[in-house]
Amino acid sequence: MVEKKEYKEWPPYAPGTHVRESDIREKKITYSWWEPEVQYSWSVGHAMSKFLQGLKDGKLYGIHCKPCKRVIVPPRMFCEYCFGPTEEWVELKDTGEIETFSISYLDADARRIEVPILIGVISIDGAYPKPMGFMHYFGEMTKDEIKIGMKVKAVWKPESEREGSITDIKYFKPLEGGSEQWDF
Amino acid sequence: MGFLEKQTDPTSPMHWRGDMQADYFYPNGIAGDKFFKHLMENDTFLATKCKPCNKILFPPRLYCEDCFEEIFEEDWMEVPASGKVKLFTKATINAHGVKMEEPKVIAVIEIDKTDSTMLGIIKTNELDKDFSGVRVKAVLRPKGNREGTLKDILYWQVI
C-alpha cells in the first residue's frame, strides 16, 4: 500500500504532441470538460450481503459446501462444482497466504508512480481447497520482500470508518510466526 | 443464512451504490485553441483560407479537409461575428425529451465572409416567423467572463 502517491509528469514533454497535466491546471489551453452522472445500484445478493456485513464487523465469512468439502470465500449461495446449495456459514480468520502477486508501477488512473503498489490474491486460512480467496493490496512490505507463500494478516480500518466494502480491509501485512491450515 | 432458509430481515440485503467516473475531456487542439483565445479577447471570429480551393473555412483549421493542403499562419483572418440563417427549426423539447417552457429556435448560420456554417440558438419572441435568409449577429458573454468554450456565444440576435 502506497502511503503517499508521487506523480510523475506524464506524458513527458514533447512540443506539438500531447497536452500536459500542467497545461490543464494552469489553464494554458482551452478545453471542454464534462462529468456525466452515471450512478448505479447493484444488488449484491444474499451471500455477498452477509460477507460485506461481516466486513463491517471486522469478520470474514466463508460458506461450507458439505458434499464437496469446500469452504468458499467470497461466499456464494450455491457450489459451482456440484450445483448444490451451500448451507453453513463459517467464520474465517483474517490471515492467509499469498497465492499470486503483482508489482505495479501504475496507479488506478494508469499514472506512473515511483513507489510500486503491491497487489495479489490471498488464500484465506480456513477456506478450502487451497487457491480460495480474493484479491487485495499488500502493505508494510517492499517489492523485494514479497514472495509467493508468504503468510499475511489483514489490517482493518477503524470500526467507525467501515462501510461494508472490501476496502474495509486496508491491506494485508506480513504475519510473524505463520498461520495454520484448517483440515476437513 | 443458508440457501434453504428464508430471508426475514429486509435490511440485510445490500445494494452496492456507485458513481462511475467517466469524465469527458476535449482539448480544442492547436487551431481551436487559437480560435477560442481570440474569442475571449475580441468580438470577432477567426477563420482560415485554403488557397488551392479558394475557400474560407470556419471554424479555423490547420489543414483543408477537402484537399488536405496545409494552412499557414498568413492565411488566418478575422471575420465578423454575424451571418445569415440557412436552415432553422423550432425545438419544443429539450435533450431529455421533456417539453420546454419556452421553445427555442435552432439555426444553421452561414457566417459572413466565409464558406462555412455553424449551429446557433436564435433568441426571439416571434417563434412562428420564417427565419430563412434573416441576418443575425452573435451575442457574446461580457469580456472577462468568457471561459474559452462555445458557450461564450450566448445566443444569436436578429439584426
Image: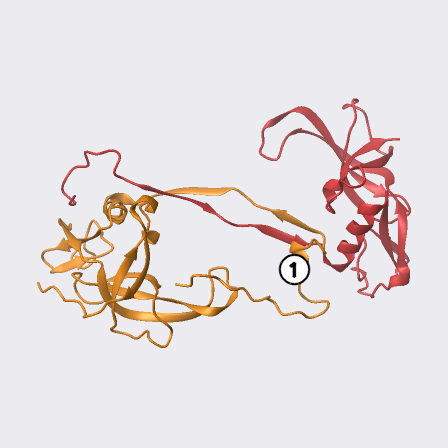
Chain colours: A orange, B red
Residue A148 is left or right of residue A27, and the answer is left
Quadrant where the N terminus of chain A lies? bottom left
Residue matched to label 1 = A22
Q: Amino acid at mark 1?
A: Ser
SS at mark 1? helix
Q: In the image, is residue B101 above or below residue A126?
A: above
Front in this rendered view, residue B136 or B41:
B41
**Which residue corresponds to the image point at 78% horizontal and 57% vertical from the top-left?**
B31
**Residue B62 falls left or right of residue A27:** right
Residue B73 visible in the current orientation = yes
Number of marks drawn: 1
Reply above or below: B139 against A106: above
Write down the quadrant of residue A94 in the picture.
Answer: bottom left
Residue A20 position, x and y percent, is 65, 62
Q: Is residue B51 visible?
A: no
- Provide the chain ID for the residue under circle 1: A
> Residue B2 appears at what percent x and percent y?
15, 45
x and y percent of residue A33 in the render?
A: 63, 48
The quadrant of the rendering that contains the C terminus of chain A is bottom left
**Percent x, y of residue B124:** 79, 26
Q: Residue at x 18, y 55 (%)?
A: A79
Q: Nearer the viewer, residue A42 or A54?
A: A54
Question: Which residue appears farthest toward the bottom when viewing the image?
Answer: A144
Tell me which corner region of the image, top left, top right, bottom left or bottom right, holds residue A129: bottom left
Image point (9%, 56%), residue name: A66
Give the crowd class for mark 1: few <14, some 14-19, many >=20 residues within 10 Å. few
Residue at (80%, 46%) from the top-left corner?
Answer: B40
Q: Is residue A66 left or right of residue B96?
A: left
Towards the viewer: B135 or B25: B25
